[in-house]
Amino acid sequence: MCVQEIAAIIGTDGASVPLNEPGNIVVYRRVRGTWEKDREMAFAIEPANGLRGLRKKVDELKTLLRDCHVFVAKSASGALFFELGKARLSVWEIPGTPAEFLDSVWLNEKAEQAAACVPPDAGIPAPTETSAGHFTISIKEIQGKRPEVSSKQVLQEFVRKGAFEQLEVLCDHIPPWIEVDAEQKGYAVATEQAGKNEVMVRLTKNAGSGCC
């Protein structure tokens, strides 16, 4: 499915804002190679309204988005990010104005969709089992050699299967999708600085979740 719409949460200065801050949700539509505003609404989460209020706002957001499944915020975390993940939205964390990031997100989404069509045996590296149920992989090393390979392409199906006790992922930044997918499969996610421009993301099966 070709990406024709991208949504973003935009502040009063015209740039993206964090997902948990007030802003305008704007859906941009690509028309003959240019991006035009298609629809928008004011959006803010009120913590005092609790989970029920959050889910009501998510429902309003889904109504606005319709068939748009790509979303940009300056940063994304917390309960709202988790709800968007459950709704299978592709969330990008990018600071800046729409003019600066829409084409880049569009091209990356197209590349990820093309990568998803590549057969699983097409030479894409997989995590290495270091001991029973324990796996490791370096996304940083893979992308240094093959920049066209995305973290989703290498890891998403592996994480969603959940057939491991622990997975360690070395990367230069935390994949924005991994926390939602991991938590849905019963994994705790921890991160630590592993070196200059290196982050270790560790997924560990929660007690009682079962494995393999």
Image (cartoon, rainbow, N blue to C red):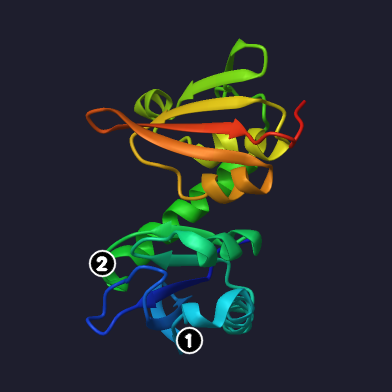
Count of labels in the image: 2
Q: Return the disc, 1 or 2, that comes first in the chain's sequence.
A: 1
Secondary structure under badge 2? loop
Binning the other alpha carbons within 10 Å of mark 2 as few (below 14), some (14 to 19) or many (20 upward) gives some
On screen, residue 52 above or below 116: below
Front position in the image: 160 or 202: 202
| Residue 126, percent from left and from top | 58, 23
| Residue 49, percent from left and from top | 55, 82
Identity of the residue drawn at 38% across and 28% down? 140
| Residue 150 in view of the camera | no
Identity of the residue drawn at 48% across and 61% down? 78
On screen, residue 30 above or below 183: below
Binning the other alpha carbons within 10 Å of mark 1 as few (below 14), some (14 to 19) or many (20 upward) gives few
| Residue 50, percent from left and from top | 57, 77
| Residue 29, percent from left and from top | 48, 78
On screen, residue 128 above or below 27: above
Where, by quadrant of the figure, is residue 23 drawn? bottom left
Q: Are marks 1 and 2 in contact (CB under 8 Å)?
A: no
The type of residue carrying mark 2 is Gly
Q: Quadrant of the C terminus?
A: top right
| Residue 42 in view of the camera | yes
Where, by quadrant of the figure, is residue 164 drawn? top right
Residue 123 left/right relative to 35: right
Q: Quadrant of the N terminus?
A: bottom right
Identity of the residue drawn at 58% across and 72% down? 68
Residue designated by label 2: 96
Identity of the residue drawn at 41% across and 69% down? 19
Residue 123 left/right relative to 190: right
Q: CA distance from mark 1 to mark 2?
A: 20 Å
Secondary structure under badge 1? strand
The type of residue carrying mark 1 is Asp
Residue designated by label 1: 38
